[in-house]
Image: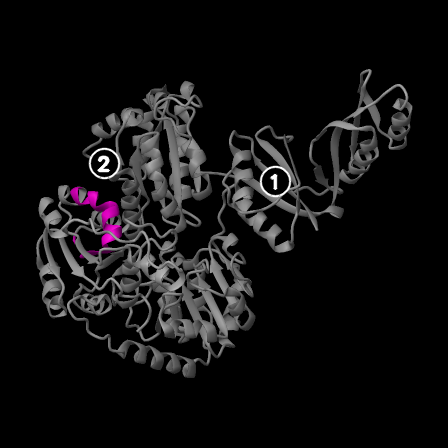
């Protein structure tokens, strides 16, 4: 089961390496990781998506809490949060098939943000699953490059961690 | 105005540090200059290799209850310290290590004696600082001592570039420590505590398993009280040895692959198991899955991450072990354990009464340990190294009011001599025995020089079998090629070596000499090496 781990940490150098190092040496696998500063400049939020059982998630949370620069940790089920991920996808395009690509882009309510004679670059901000679908749809045209930010999430409603 | 180096010294003074184990070098020279100015207040002990500075600080911390402090230079000084830090981390010993670092503007350029020591230590350190501004040092010193000594104790590293040590700043008091990401839970949940009390009362075969965390929380007295009040037998891990006297009627012994039979029997047959300050490592409990199937497990620990890590707990109880045990003693604790206790006591009696067959032409280490235990001061400290000697010392030396110390978690060979020196600095008048093998002794025998220089009368029991006995045993039992790479025909004549250091010594190889030799060792003034020639095929397994 996919679990979202939201971690508030001191915004200091070296903190991310402490966290990623912890995951590596304890054998915790993460699918994605996004970091950014929060409304409080001294605090950063790390959002991680991990595919793990409950007991592993519990150990992850406990081990993260042991790190001194970690302020708060919460694990969420996917339905407890709103999540978005941003992806940029550069696809091969010719005069012949550019229209076809545009149709798919329109159908997925997303947009083209850059183009050249041989490529288009698509921006999508959606759930990881939707991004996967778009990637699948673009594969036949020839994907040249993909950049994904990893999921960021906040709890639904007025709650915060 | 104040310099970074002065702020470091002030931080030590604030925490009443009067001894520091170290090894100087270029990048830590500004701080050494400050140490020189403070020589009347802080004694600096020059070690012979940096790792041992950490081990001495560890030995000092374990018996004094204070934070042990060590200081080394950057680069190789810092990397040599690493094993000492890891050893302290695995055994949860509070030490603060200060390392010099190359100047700030040279960081990351791989200049002479530069190493990323905070990065290197990250997996096995409680917390570390790379200081960028001297004005942060007053706060960092307070935080470091606070983090090292509270919650689950452990090592903290402060890496200080040499220019930061020289940097001047206007001192302002950093105030009380307040770290938003570090608020250890100390009070046990009262509801959980009464739940635990009820569970114990319902038990027919209750058992306490005491680990090193009992010492970390200074809770041995409370643990003994709980055991006595509830008539609950106690087993210990190796780190928990000497929580209660060996002869305490409720002490069933040490569990684990090298433990006492009755203790392992008790662990496998208890109906309610109260684990106190132990991580349930593989060496202590080989099949935690089996135990949790048949037993109600109560796990008391200051570190929430220990609970459920190696064994699932029926009732988790997070908090300071001493506080929780005190509260438990106040509850009604009266399980009907009479039959269970008498069954275990009978087993212990039989186990201890077993004759250890005499050896011909060598010293039987097990019998030797029994005889040593009988002659030791009531409150002696025994520091055992790692290998066969550790098992023999842990299993066969009877401890009364003293302590048994060893590197239980990391299993660091060479720990015993430097740790014993640290112990001696904390308690100069207490009898301190260092037990080691020829392998482990050679890993830190350079510290004999530190021992002699400081007039520390440590009694060293050295089992000599001309090989690495523990590995020899393992290879014989489990590998097709048998023993390999364990012979040490080139070892020195240890008595001559002792002589070179100006220490008295004696070599024995006949069991009839044991009592007299122990007596001579204990009554001789100053350090002493008692070399016991043992059979190379002597095993650690039970009789």
Residue B409: image location, x then y, percent: 39, 53
In the image, B228 versus B76, the foreground residue is B76
Query: Can you name the residue that lies furthest to the top here?
Result: A117
What residue range appears in magenta? Answer: B429-449
Query: Can you name the residue that lies furthest to the front here?
Result: B481
Q: Colour scheme of this structure image?
A: one colour
Q: Residues within 10 Å of mark 2 (few under 14, many from 20)?
A: some
Q: Residue at x 35, y 74 (%)?
A: B250
Residue B60: image location, x then y, percent: 27, 48
Q: Quadrant of residue A116?
A: top right
Rendered image: mark on residue B42: 2
In the image, B485 versus A36, the foreground residue is B485
Q: Residue at x 21, y 52 (%)?
A: B489
Tell me the SS state at disc 1: strand
In the image, B43 versus B113, the foreground residue is B113
Number of marks drawn: 2
Image height of B193 relative to A30, above or below = below
Q: Residue at x 38, y 79 (%)?
A: B344
User: Looking at the image, is mark 1 or mark 2 nearer the viewer?
Assistant: 1
Image height of B43 relative to B539, above or below = above
What is the CA distance from the residue labelled 1 to the residue labelled 2? 42 Å
Query: Visible in this render: residue B30?
Result: yes
Q: Chain of mark 1?
A: A
Image height of B21 relative to B292, above or below = above
In the image, B85 versus B8, the foreground residue is B85
Q: Is residue B269 magenta?
A: no
Work out whether disc 1 and disc 2 sit on a shared chain: no
The answer to whether residue B454 is left or right of residue B258 is left
The residue to which callout 1 is attached is: A7
């Amino acid at each position: 089961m996919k679990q979202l781990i939201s971690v508030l940490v001191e915004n200091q150098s070296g903190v991310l390496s402490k966290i990623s190092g912890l995951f590596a040496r304890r054998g915790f696998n993460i699918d994605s990781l996004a970091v950014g500063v929060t409304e409080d400049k001294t605090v950063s939020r790390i959002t991680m998506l991990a595919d793990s059982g409950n007991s592993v998630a519990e150990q992850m949370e406990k081990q993260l809490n042991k790190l001194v620069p970690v302020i708060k940790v919460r694990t969420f089920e996917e339905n407890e949060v709103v999540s978005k991920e941003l992806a940029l996808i550069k696809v091969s395009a010719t005069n012949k098939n550019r229209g076809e690509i545009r149709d798919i882009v329109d159908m997925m309510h997303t947009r083209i943000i850059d183009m050249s004679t041989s490529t288009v670059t698509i921006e999508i901000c959606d759930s990881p699953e939707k991004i996967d679908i778009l990637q699948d749809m673009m594969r036949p045209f020839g994907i040249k490059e993909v950049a994904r930010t990893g999921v960021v999430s906040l709890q639904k409603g007025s709650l915060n961690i | 105005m104040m310099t970074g180096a002065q702020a470091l010294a002030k931080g030590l003074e604030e925490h009443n540090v009067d001894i520091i184990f170290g090894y100087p070098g270029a990048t830590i020279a500004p701080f050494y200059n400050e140490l020189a100015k403070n020589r009347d207040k802080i004694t600096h002990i020059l070690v012979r290799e940096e790792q041992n500075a950490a081990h001495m600080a560890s030995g000092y911390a374990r018996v004094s209850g204070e934070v042990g402090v060590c200081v080394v230079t950057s680069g190789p000084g810092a990397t040599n310290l690493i094993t000492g830090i890891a050893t302290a981390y695995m055994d949860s010993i509070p030490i603060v290590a200060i390392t010099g670092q190359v100047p700030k503007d040279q960081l990351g350029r791989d200049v002479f004696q530069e190493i990323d020591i905070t990065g290197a230590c990250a997996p096995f350190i409680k917390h570390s600082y790379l200081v960028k501004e001297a004005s942060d040092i007053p706060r960092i010193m307070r935080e470091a001592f606070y983090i090292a000594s509270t919650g689950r104790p452990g090592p903290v590293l402060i890496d200080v570039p040499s220019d930061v040590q020289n940097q001047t700043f206007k001192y302002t008091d950093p105030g009380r420590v307040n770290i938003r990401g570090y608020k250890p839970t100390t009070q046990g949940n009262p509801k959980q505590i009464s739940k635990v009390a009820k569970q114990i009362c319902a038990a027919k075969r209750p058992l306490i398993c005491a680990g090193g965390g009992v010492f970390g929380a200074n809770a041995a007295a409370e643990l003994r009280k709980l055991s006595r009040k509830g008539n609950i037998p106690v087993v210990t891990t190796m780190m928990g040895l000497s929580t209660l006297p060996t002869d305490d009627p409720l002490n069933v012994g040490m569990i684990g692959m090298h433990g006492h039979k009755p203790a392992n029997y008790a662990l496998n047959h208890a109906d309610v198991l109260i684990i106190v300050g132990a991580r349930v490592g593989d060496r202590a409990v080989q099949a935690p899955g089996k135990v949790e199937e048949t037993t109600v497990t109560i796990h008391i620990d200051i570190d929430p991450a220990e609970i459920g890590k190696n064994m699932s707990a029926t009732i988790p109880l997070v908090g300071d072990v001493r506080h929780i045990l005190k509260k438990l003693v106040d509850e009604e604790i009266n399980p009907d354990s009479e039959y269970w206790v008498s069954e275990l006591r009978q087993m212990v009696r039989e186990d201890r009464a077993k004759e250890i067959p005499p050896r011909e032409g060598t010293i039987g280490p097990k019998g030797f340990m029994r005889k040593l235990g009988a002659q030791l001061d009531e409150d002696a400290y025994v520091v055992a190294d790692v290998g066969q000697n550790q098992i023999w010392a842990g299993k066969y030396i009877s401890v009364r009011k003293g302590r048994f110390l060893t590197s239980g978690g990391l299993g660091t060979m060479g720990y015993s001599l430097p740790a014993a020196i640290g112990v001696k600095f904390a308690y100069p008048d207490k009898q301190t025995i260092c037990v080691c093998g020829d392998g482990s002794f050679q890993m830190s025998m350079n510290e004999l020089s530190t021992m002699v220089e400081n007039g520390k009368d440590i009694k060293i029991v050295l089992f000599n079998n001309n090989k690495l006995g523990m590995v020899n045993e393992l290879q014989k039992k489990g590998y097709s090629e048998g023993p390999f790479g364990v012979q040490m025909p080139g070892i020195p004549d240890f008595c001559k070596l002792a002589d070179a250091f100006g220490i008295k010594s004696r070599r024995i190889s006949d069991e009839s000499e044991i009592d007299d030799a122990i007596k001579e060792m204990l009554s001789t003034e100053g350090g002493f090496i008692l070399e016991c020639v043992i059979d190379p095929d002597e095993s650690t397994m039970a009789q």
